């Protein structure tokens, strides 16, 4: 992973397209584009959709890496101060928070600050950290639509001559995300069960939006080990509610989910928190990942 990060750092140094970028390497138009740095894939998706050909987007979390464990190279830290815009989320990646305090970029969008204006942040109790704010707001398509419009407005302020195009592209992306929300709402309206078991507590915002109940094996950290008492509680809930499927995810170990499913004789399936892409991902963009999750929930919960 360090070699991948170094490669991306070299790309940033020469301000040409590369890892996580929207432009091909060596494109002479690249130095005319706004340089955007994002910290996780969902915000890379938004920045690319809103900015289009007018931006180059570099994502600090490389494909296949667990975003919560991100560590930055010195060059990546420096890139934050050089970017025209940084899109990040306070509390999600401590290394990013520390780097931003050090570099103080000229323009940034903190997703948690946007969330505070558009929705009530979710809090949860994590055995390792006590009561903490759930950072997984990107799993709410409505919030993502609002964030797309926020990014369009901010890019328009940075580059006023292109403000109309940013607004148009942001509105088009927001419409796609609202269509996704409509599909979730209609397909999950009538289900035999409203509860689902997930590897870790990443799906709180999705559950709140669509009147579902998340039963997480681990807390907000996918690496946290649940206690024996927690595992026993989950087994009881699964039996009482007739749950048929235990969900695991692509960027974290599936061992606990598979073990629980084996003990109870249940199916396993992927429910992707859409934190990043891999070769094993069900789709290669955010909306595709979310639609795959929707299909999985509909099947697991016997939705009409």
Image: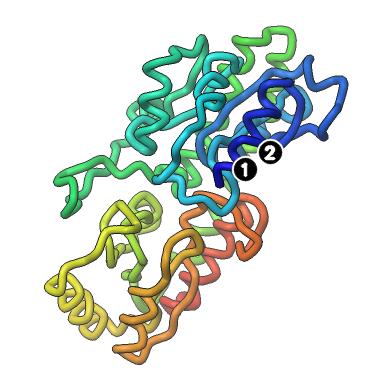
Question: Which residue does the image show at 37% across and 17% down from the upper left?
Answer: 101
**Observer-nearest of 235 and 293:** 235
Is the Cβ of the residue at disc 1 closer than 8 Å to that at disc 2?
A: yes
Q: Tag 1: Cα neighbours inside 10 Å, few (<14), some, or many (≥20)?
A: few
Quick one: label 2, few (<14), some, or many (20+) residues within 10 Å? Answer: many
Taking the image as drawn, is residue 171 in sight? no
- The front one of 100 and 213 is 100
Quadrant assignment, res 158: top right
In the visual, does 145 lie left or right of 231? right
Mark 1 or mark 2, which has the lower sequence index? Answer: 1
User: Is residue 173 shown left or right of residue 193?
Assistant: right
Q: Which residue is mark 2?
A: 19
Which type of secondary structure does the marked residue at label 1 adopt? helix
Which residue occupies the extreme bottom position in the image?
265
Task: State which mark lies toward you, 1 or 2.
Answer: 1
The residue at the point 56 percent across, 32 percent down is: 148
How much space separates mark 1 and mark 2, taking CA atoms?
A: 8 Å
Q: Residue at x 53, y 14 (%)?
A: 81
In the picture as drawn, the residue positioned furthest to the left comes out as 229
Is residue 224 placed above or below 29 in the rendered structure?
below
Q: Which mark is residue 33?
A: none
State which quadrant residue 215 falls in. Answer: bottom left
Q: Position of residue 153 (x, y in %)?
A: 58, 18
What residue is disc 1 on? 4
Residue 303 visible in the current orientation: yes
Residue at image x 62%, y 40%?
45
**Image spot of residue 142 (x, y percent):** 48, 42
Give residue 232's position: percent from left, percent from top: 16, 78
């Amino acid at each position: 992973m360090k070699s991948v990060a170094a490669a991306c750092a070299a790309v940033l140094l020469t301000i040409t397209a590369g890892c996580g970028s929207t432009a091909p390497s060596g494109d002479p138009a690249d130095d005319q584009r706004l340089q955007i740095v994002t910290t996780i894939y969902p915000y890379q998706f938004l920045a690319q959709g809103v900015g289009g050909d007018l931006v180059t987007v570099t994502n600090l979390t490389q494909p296949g890496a667990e975003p919560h464990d991100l560590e930055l190279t010195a060059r990546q830290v420096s890139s934050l101060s050089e970017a025209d815009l940084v899109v990040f989320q306070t509390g999600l990646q401590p290394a990013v928070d520390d780097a931003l305090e050090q570099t103080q970029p000229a323009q940034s969008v903190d997703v948690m600050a946007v969330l505070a204006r558009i929705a009530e942040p979710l809090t949860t109790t994590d055995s390792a950290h006590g009561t903490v704010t759930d950072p997984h707001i990107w799993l709410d398509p409505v919030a993502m639509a609002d964030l797309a419009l926020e990014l369009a407005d901010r890019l328009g302020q940075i580059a006023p001559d292109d403000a109309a195009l940013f607004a148009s592209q942001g509105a088009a992306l927001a419409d796609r995300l609202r269509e996704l929300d409509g599909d979730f709402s209609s397909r999950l309206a009538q289900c035999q069960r409203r509860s689902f078991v997930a590897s870790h507590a990443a799906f709180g915002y999705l559950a709140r939006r669509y009147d579902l109940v998340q039963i997480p094996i681990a807390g907000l950290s996918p690496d946290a080990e649940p206690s024996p008492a927690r595992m026993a509680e989950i087994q009881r809930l699964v039996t009482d509610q007739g749950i048929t499927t235990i969900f695991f995810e692509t960027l974290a170990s599936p061992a606990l989910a598979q073990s629980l499913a084996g003990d109870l004789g249940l199916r396993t399936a992927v429910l992707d928190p859409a934190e990043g892409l891999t070769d094993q991902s069900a789709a290669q963009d955010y909306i595709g990942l979310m639609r795959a999750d929707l299909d999985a929930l509909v099947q697991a919960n016997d939705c009409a």
